[in-house]
Structure formats: structure tokens, C-alpha cells
Image (cartoon, coloured by chain):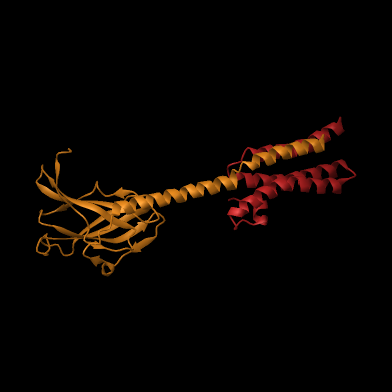
């Protein structure tokens, strides 16, 4: 049961953020929400894996970063085509106001 | 009410400046049949690139012999229009300027100061103006300004859609959710 819960938890967090970002297509919130996906999901997973004492923490974390960063990078690069003033660092700081 | 003001004659500006973002499209002298007084009615047009919030106008009127038409005209009639006018819109027709008689046949309408909606103040010294009338079609220029601003808005809307609402975003998220589910399950 704890294993099933862990898998469910690990799957639900990114799925929730993916859907959260998906529903904001058409507004500038999409960049902010994909940045949340790219930052929060690996962080939450890392915390969870450290707490549960998982063995393959590094591999999972790297995979997580790659998977979560791709939607963000796609959106970011597309936005940057039209607005050169947006930087990657600023785009990742989703907590800052627009 | 509609019959109260009788149009005596219409006029256009006899001076011109290409730098104006606001210009006189046409003017009219009206007679108030109730009080038997005359009024000037100006139809101004925003032919610039940005909305304006305030316009100061200075008017000089001359009779057929080129003399000032209104006694005590110096300085001329000053009028201020404080209304937000989008690009390509006409304004000023609701504001009547009282004048003492109907002797004027030509008018010099100086646009002295224009304030944009962002608070930027543009001043136009009277020395810049050329007399004689250039036959500019202000209504056409107004339509052109309106067309230009609509084209710009349409272009901006298209860019916004491409930036934030590209259709391939949906494909990206659908595929990515699928990828993630396959990876996890």
C-alpha cells in the first residue's frame, strides 16, 4: 500500500501541474505555470524521495527535471520568439509579479 | 431642439501644419434661433497615432476684406476640448463656441496644444503654420489613421495568439501527459 501511494503521489503532482498549465493556454499564465511545473515538481519529488529514503534519488531527480522542463522550454522558446526581453532566469521565477 | 440651431455656413481651415496629430475636419457657424446668437461648431479629428485626452484650440476669424471679424478678437477665441478621443475618431461637435456675429468668412484654427492619453503634451507654435489652405482631406486622413490603428491591433492580437495560445500547445500537453502516464504506470 505505501508503494502504491508513493507511485500515485509521484504521478499525480506532475499531472496536476500539467493540467493546471494546459487550462491556461491563451493567457500569459501558461509561462508561469509551466515554470511552476519545472521547478516545483522536481523539488517536491526530491523532498519526497529523501524522506522515504529511496535508493535511486539522483536518477529519478534528473529524469524529473528533463521531463518537467521540456513543456516549459517549449513555451518559453516560443514566447521568446516574439518577446526578446524575456530571460530564462526571469521566466523561471514564477513567484515574482508580472 | 434640432431646429433650434440653424447652420449658417460651413468652413474648412485656411491654415495647415503637417505636424498636427489633430486637425479641423470642418467647422460651421450656427444661429441659435431662440436667443438669436451665433456659435462656432468645430469638428476636430484625431489623425495621429495615439489617443488624445485634451486639445487646446485658438481661432482667428476674418471677414471678406481680411479684417478681424469679431470686434475685440485679439487674442482670438480660445477653446479647450477635454475628452478622450481614440485614433481616427472625430470630436468637438457638441461644444459650441459663442461668437458675436456672422461676419466671418475665413477661419484660422490653430491646434496649440495636444495632450495624449499617456500625459505627453505636444505644443505647436503658430509660426509653424502655413496659410492658404492645402486642400487636405482630413476625413480621409482620419479613416486612414483608423485603418492603421485597426491593422496594428489586429497584428498585435495575432502575435498574442501565437505567443500564448498557439494550437500546438494543446498537442504538447496532450502528448506530454500521455508520455508521463506511460512512464509512471
Quadrant hosting residue A19: top right
Residue B61 lies left or right of residue B49; in this view the side is: left
Q: What is the residue that sits farthest to the top in this orientation? A: A1
Q: Residue at horizontal 88%, vertical 45%?
A: A56
Asked if B182 appears above or below B137 in the picture, the reply is above
- What is the quadrant of the N terminus of chain A in the image? top right
Q: Residue at horizontal 12%, vertical 63%?
A: B68
Q: Residue at horizontal 81%, vertical 38%?
A: B183
**Residue B103 appearing in the image:** yes
Q: Nearer the viewer, residue B4 or B182?
A: B182
Residue B36 lies left or right of residue A85; in this view the side is: left
Quadrant hosting residue B72: bottom left
Residue B88 lies left or right of residue A80; in this view the side is: left
Percent position of residue A57, x then y? 86, 46
Asked if B18 appears above or below B28 in the picture, the reply is below
Q: How many marks?
A: 0
Q: Residue at horizontal 73%, vertical 48%?
A: A69
Chain A shade:
red
**Residue A39 appearing in the image:** no
Chain B shade:
orange
Percent position of residue A22, x then y? 65, 39
Residue A87 lies left or right of residue A14; in this view the side is: left
Amino acid at each position: 500500500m505505501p508503494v502504491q501511494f508513493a507511485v500515485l503521489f509521484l504521478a499525480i503532482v506532475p499531472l496536476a501541474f500539467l493540467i493546471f498549465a494546459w487550462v491556461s493556454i491563451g493567457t500569459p499564465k501558461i509561462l508561469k505555470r509551466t515554470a511552476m511545473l519545472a521547478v516545483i515538481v522536481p523539488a517536491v519529488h526530491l523532498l519526497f524521495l529523501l524522506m522515504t529514503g529511496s535508493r535511486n534519488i539522483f536518477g529519478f531527480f534528473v529524469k524529473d527535471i528533463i521531463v518537467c522542463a521540456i513543456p516549459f522550454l517549449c513555451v518559453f522558446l516560443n514566447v521568446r520568439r516574439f518577446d526578446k526581453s524575456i530571460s530564462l532566469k526571469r521566466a523561471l521565477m514564477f513567484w515574482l509579479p508580472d | 431642439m434640432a431646429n433650434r440651431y440653424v447652420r449658417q455656413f460651413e468652413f474648412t481651415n485656411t491654415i495647415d501644419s503637417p505636424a498636427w496629430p489633430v486637425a479641423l475636419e470642418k467647422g460651421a457657424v450656427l444661429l441659435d434661433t431662440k436667443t438669436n446668437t451665433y456659435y462656432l461648431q468645430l469638428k476636430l479629428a484625431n489623425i495621429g497615432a495615439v489617443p488624445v485626452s485634451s486639445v487646446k484650440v485658438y481661432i482667428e476669424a476674418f471677414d471678406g476684406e481680411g479684417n478681424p471679424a469679431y470686434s475685440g478678437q485679439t487674442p482670438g477665441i480660445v477653446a479647450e476640448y477635454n475628452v478622450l478621443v481614440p485614433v481616427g475618431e472625430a470630436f468637438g461637435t457638441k461644444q459650441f463656441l459663442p461668437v458675436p456675429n456672422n461676419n466671418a468668412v475665413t477661419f484660422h484654427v490653430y491646434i496649440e496644444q495636444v495632450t495624449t492619453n499617456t500625459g505627453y503634451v505636444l505644443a505647436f507654435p503658430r509660426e509653424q503654420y502655413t496659410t492658404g489652405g492645402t486642400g487636405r482631406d482630413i476625413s480621409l486622413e482620419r479613416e486612414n489613421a483608423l485603418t492603421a490603428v485597426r491593422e496594428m491591433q489586429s497584428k498585435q492580437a495575432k502575435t498574442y495568439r501565437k505567443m500564448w495560445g498557439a494550437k500546438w500547445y494543446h498537442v504538447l500537453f496532450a502528448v506530454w501527459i500521455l508520455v508521463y502516464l506511460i512512464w509512471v504506470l
